[in-house]
Image (tube, rainbow, N blue to C red):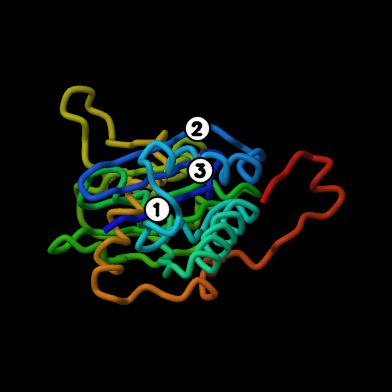
Amino acid sequence: MNLLALDTSTEFLSLALTLNDKFFTHYQAAGSAASQLVLPQIQVLLNSANMKLKDLDGIAFGAGPGAFTGVRIASGVAQGLGFGANLPVVGINTLTALAETSGKQKVIACLDARMGEIYHAALAKKDGIWVEISETQVCKPQNAPTLEGEDWFGVGSGWAVYMEDLTLIYGQNLSQDLNEGLPNILGDFTPTAEAILRLAQPIFESGKAKPAIEAMPIYVRNRVALTTAEREQGLRL
């Protein structure tokens, strides 16, 4: 299938395009410029593959959780392009995409949610399918849900920011790096469009993709705005 995938849930803009057996990707630190960059870079990717939008079979996107503006950009672009070209869409949970990006089988996925919180889910891959052992939620790092078992990997920016709090909770659960004697933590990993595309492809192939009008973000935080005082402190959602 010819599929386009995009993610803007973090400070990175990630795009992936598959044309038969060929892959085309784009990944850059975009920050707040993602809204200006995403459409031109999609066009660059299509040009690289010598394709037009109408040649696609569908569009996948990182639906969240993540930065409020970022998940709205991704869902809005997927909806707009899909509606304009009459293409189906698939929204993928960004924490599942983060787990898929890691290449591991048991992942405690944590993204920095700002405001002293994390987006959190624990996922295990069973028969090639990711299963949520602890459901997607937003919480304070010190209130992250406990888990059973060992050989878990900590993945995502939440680990980089709240390493101490999270290792206090999960120190006994985490796999150990045999060379360093330290917990296996991949704090610099982000969800990627390549992972989103891999997760979305079987959904497209099974005919379970949705009409473009149903491209919606996944919100797990009720707050969608900051107070003036919070903005002056440099806080972000």
Decide if residue 168 is in sight here: no
* Quadrant location of the N terminus in the rendered image: bottom left
Q: Looking at the image, is 75 positioned above or below residue 47?
A: below
Q: Position of residue 145 (x, y in %)?
A: 41, 61
Q: How far apart are marks 1 and 2 (CA)?
A: 17 Å
For marks 3 and 2 on the same chain, the one whose residue lies earlier in the sequence = 2
Name which residue lies at 41% across and 33% down. 188
Q: What element carries label 3?
A: helix
Q: Which mark is drawn over residue 4?
A: 1
Mark toward the start of the polypeptide (3 vs 1):
1
Secondary structure under badge 2?
strand
**Are circles 3 and 2 on residues that touch, CB within 8 Å?**
no
Vertical order, 177 against 226 (above or below): above
The disc at residue 152 is none
Nearer to us of marks 3 and 2 is 3
Residue denoted by label 2:
28
Look at label 3 and name its amino acid.
Answer: Gln
Mark 3–mark 1 Cα distance, whole angstroms, equals 11 Å
Q: Which of 196 and 168 is in front in this view?
A: 196
Compare residues 6 and 44 and report the one nearer the observer.
44
Residue linked to disc 3 = 43
Q: Residue furthest left?
A: 127
The reply, left or right, for residue 30 in relation to residue 150 is right
At label 2, which amino acid type do we have? Gln
Q: Residue at x 48, y 37 (%)?
A: 44
